Image (cartoon, grey):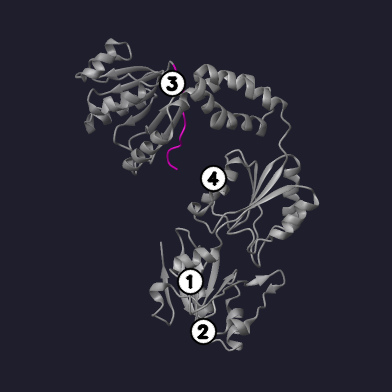
Amino acid sequence: MRHFPIFLDLRDRRVVLAGGGDAALAKLRLILKTEAKVTVFAEDAAPEIIAWDAEHKLRLVKRAFAPGDALCASLAYAATEDDAEDARIASLARADGALVNIVDNLDGSAFITPAIVDRDPVTVAIGTEGAAPVLARKIKADLEAALPPSLGILARIGKGFRSAVNVLPRGRKRRDFWQSYYFKIGPEALANAGEPGVEQALGDLLVDHISAEDRAGHVALVGAGPGDPELLTLKARKLLDEADVVIHDRLVAPEILELARREATLLDVGKQGFGPSTRQEDIGVLMVEHAAKGAQVVRLKSGDPGVYGRLDEELDVLDEHGIEWSIVPGITAANAAAAQLGQSLTKRGRNSAMRFLTGHDVKGFAEHDWRNLTKPGQVAAIYMGAKGARFIQGRMLMHGAAPDTPVTAVENASRTDVRIIASHLSTLPADIDAADTTGPVILMLGLSPRQAATQLPALQEEFA
């Protein structure tokens, strides 16, 4: 992030702008929404600027920008649409100590003006660091349609009520109050009784929350899916937005953690096969400790919590301590990997059943019914199988599997950095070693990528 987004208080602060044409008008339409004291320097100003001067919305100085014109100014805009003149103005304004923006010149600007959705006092700023203005406009249009004009009215009334709400303790109690106001009670009251009705509803709501019992702590065991944030369920997103504490696995994608509430406590309890890991007992202690204090806890697991997620052990701990819990399923890696391959997990005439297997367990490499797995047409998803590829290969060949049995390794299934390593049993360990995988890998036994199904022996492809 090159540009740090902030909201600058411009009440009674000086803002200067040099230019009188279309670029100047575009900036002034935004700046005049603030409470800044605006001065425009232009020898030839558009009629709108002249009118704003007559209405005392700004001060127009009919000359070129000169040294000292930006003294005590918080911001200075160079908007003459002449590169050489804008550079001269920017140099003078910097010398006067102002932050400078040159219109349509990202590298020459100390700050940028984002696209804005105005629901005063609610303001949404959208920036793309100059990379995609058309994208910013599309996002702005979508937000304009999604945010009703009444949002500003509710926010203004709520702002005047904030001091009264200080009677509630900080944290969840206050958040629950404001969530109820903005998303239920407030809109209903405004629609039914107008602004006076909203003020009455606020008072009644506060009384209800003062007398309400504290919400009991709760642990939601949530599947984060294979990594793509768009594969997260709506319920999972809602819980992340409400969580006080998020206890997450190592494999949960950073983009999904970004969806958690900013004030939430994030605790990494990652485990790594044959590497450093958080003890399962310590994870249980953390869940119980935070929930016992009344926190809404999300135990966030990669994929689905019921597939190699040690779900039962964690539920046993919560039951033992009388902690309420719920389970939110997620898309497991096998589903995501099969989708990347363009294959189904079951197919008429090939396999009417499939297996979910683990490459290793707490004792080391995991043993399975290898003889059944060697039968033609068998399909299995082997989780955590990359490090055990040679062990799996040996067991399968020893029990009579055909060397050309297709096996596809999928690294980072569903993510933008997904890699598909098409192989077969005879070369599986060598192909995985050559790929030098670093992300989570699932082995799809019996499946090849659709486009590679007729091109064995092994091939290797990358998908961005």
Residue underneath mark 3:
10
Q: Nearer the viewer, mark 1 or mark 2?
A: 2
Q: Earlier in the sequence, mark 1 or mark 2?
A: 2
Q: CA distance from mark 2 to mark 4?
A: 43 Å
Front residue of 350/365: it is 350
Q: As displayed, is residue 387 above or below residue 254?
A: below
Q: CA distance from mark 3 to mark 4?
A: 31 Å
Label 4 packing within 10 angstroms: few (<14), some (14-19), many (20+): some
Residue depicted at x 67% and y 29%: 170
Local secondary structure at mark 4: loop
Residue underneath mark 2:
426
Q: Disc 1 residue type? A: Ala
Where residue 435 is drawn, which disc sits there? 1
Quadrant in the picture for the C terminus: bottom left
Residue 430: image location, x then y, percent: 51, 79
Q: CA distance from mark 3 to mark 1?
A: 55 Å
Front residue of 378/414: it is 378
Residue underneath mark 4:
259
Q: Main secondary structure of the magenta part?
A: loop
Q: Disc 2 residue type? A: Ser
Front residue of 372/196: it is 196
Residue 360: image location, x then y, percent: 65, 71
Q: Quadrant of residue 355?
A: bottom right
Q: From where the camera sits, is residue 96 visible?
A: yes
Q: Nearer the viewer, mark 2 or mark 3?
A: 2
Q: CA distance from mark 1 to mark 4?
A: 31 Å
Q: CA distance from mark 1 to mark 2?
A: 16 Å
Q: Earlier in the sequence, mark 1 or mark 4?
A: 4
Q: Earlier in the sequence, mark 3 or mark 4?
A: 3
Q: Which residue range is magenta in the image?
A: 1-11
Q: Is residue 108 left or right of residue 294?
A: left
